[in-house]
Image: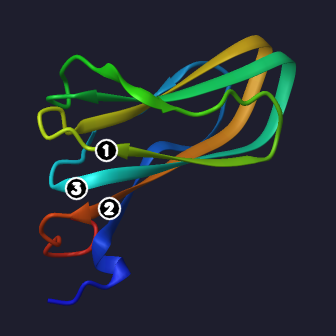
Amino acid sequence: MSRQVKNLINPKLGLTPQTATSTQTGTGIDCSGYDEVVYVLMVGAVSGTSPTLDVKIQESDAVGGTYADISGAAFAQVTTATHQLHLDTRVNSAKPWQRVVGTITGSSPSFALAVPMLRVNPALQPAAAGA
């Protein structure tokens, strides 16, 4: 069985590309069967007075379950434009659902942002791309 890079990663969107003016909570993504997830925080234009963006990763045992912060899984606070940061998290087999929460504060804040995620190192390779 080939271990090509394309077979070892499975991309999803933790937060879709958007211009956000308030806190954003992504949909839970099932990460079961993967060892880790790499998140990339991409920020373009930022406006407002004293705008702040705090992005963290949470986990749960079910998509509609209770989510809790993953210890150490938070990006450095963003206050200015043009950032690309990455963060790695391990997948807890008891709580394989992960989601992104971006808390936005300030006076009339606005952040052009996206948070793609790469689920990596599957125990078994997916049968088809995008599975």
**Amino acid at circle 3:** Tyr
**Amino acid at circle 1:** Arg
Camera sees residue 27 = no
Which numbered dot is residue 34?
A: 3
Give the secondary structure at mark 2. strand
Percent across and percent down for residue 104 are 65, 19
Percent across and percent down for residue 67 are 28, 20
Residue positioned most to the front:
72
Position of 20 with respect to 108 (left or right) is: left
Which mark lies nearer to you, 3 or 1?
1
Whether residues under marks 2 and 3 lie with C-beta atoms below 8 angstroms apart, the answer is yes
Q: Is residue 89 above or below residue 94?
A: below
Percent across and percent down for residue 95 are 18, 32
Res. 78 image quadrant: top right
Q: Residue at x 75, y 27 (%)?
A: 110
**Which residue corresponds to mark 1?**
90
**Amino acid at circle 2:** Val
Position of 40 with respect to 93 (left or right) is: right
Q: Depth check: 101 or 57 in front?
A: 57
Q: Is residue 117 above or below residue 128?
A: above
Q: CA distance from mark 2 to mark 3?
A: 6 Å
Which numbered dot is residue 64?
A: none
Which numbered dot is residue 120?
A: 2
Task: Say few, some or many: other residues with alpha carbon within 10 Å of mark 1 (under 14 / 14 to 19 / 20 or more).
Answer: some
